[in-house]
Amino acid sequence: MDSSAPSPIFDMLLWGGAAVSLFGLAGIIWCIFRVSRAKRLGLDDAQMKELIRSVLPVNLGALFLSVIGLMMVILGISLG
């Protein structure tokens, strides 16, 4: 076996991390569109606070997924 050939497990870690990171990015983009659409509708202050309160957990979860995915990519590159 060639010692310079990447291990399949690290390839899976790298591409899996990229996929997880893209899911997180999609969630962040969804949150941006959701809040910008609400701003265009001209909601009053109470309605806007309620919308932001409902979008915040999704935003934090998506950010978490993006960070975990990028960490997986870096591990796959470093260990591979």
Image: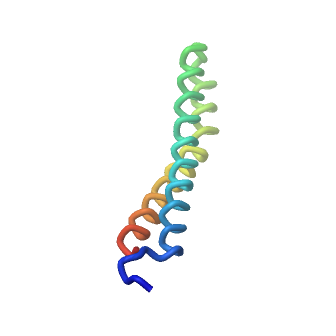
Vertical arrangement, residue 26 with respect to residue 74, above or below: above
Vertical arrangement, residue 16 with respect to residue 46, above or below: below
Residue 15 locus on image (x, y percent): 52, 60
Residue 47 locus on image (x, y percent): 63, 24
Where the N terminus falls, by quadrant? Answer: bottom left
What is the quadrant of residue 52 in the picture?
top right
Question: Which of 38 and 31 lies nearest the eye of the viewer?
Answer: 31
Question: Which of 41 and 14 lies nearest the eye of the viewer?
Answer: 14
Write the residue at 55% across / 61% down.
16
Question: Which of 16 and 64 lies nearest the eye of the viewer?
Answer: 16
Write the residue at 58% across / 30% down.
49
Question: Which of 71 and 18 lies nearest the eye of the viewer?
Answer: 18
In the displayed orientation, state which residue is furthest to the front.
1
What is the quadrant of residue 33 in the picture?
top right
Residue 25 locus on image (x, y percent): 51, 44
Vertical arrangement, residue 6 with respect to residue 28, above or below: below
Write the residue at 50% across / 50% down.
63
Write the residue at 39% across / 65% down.
74
Q: Is residue 75 left or right of residue 26?
A: left
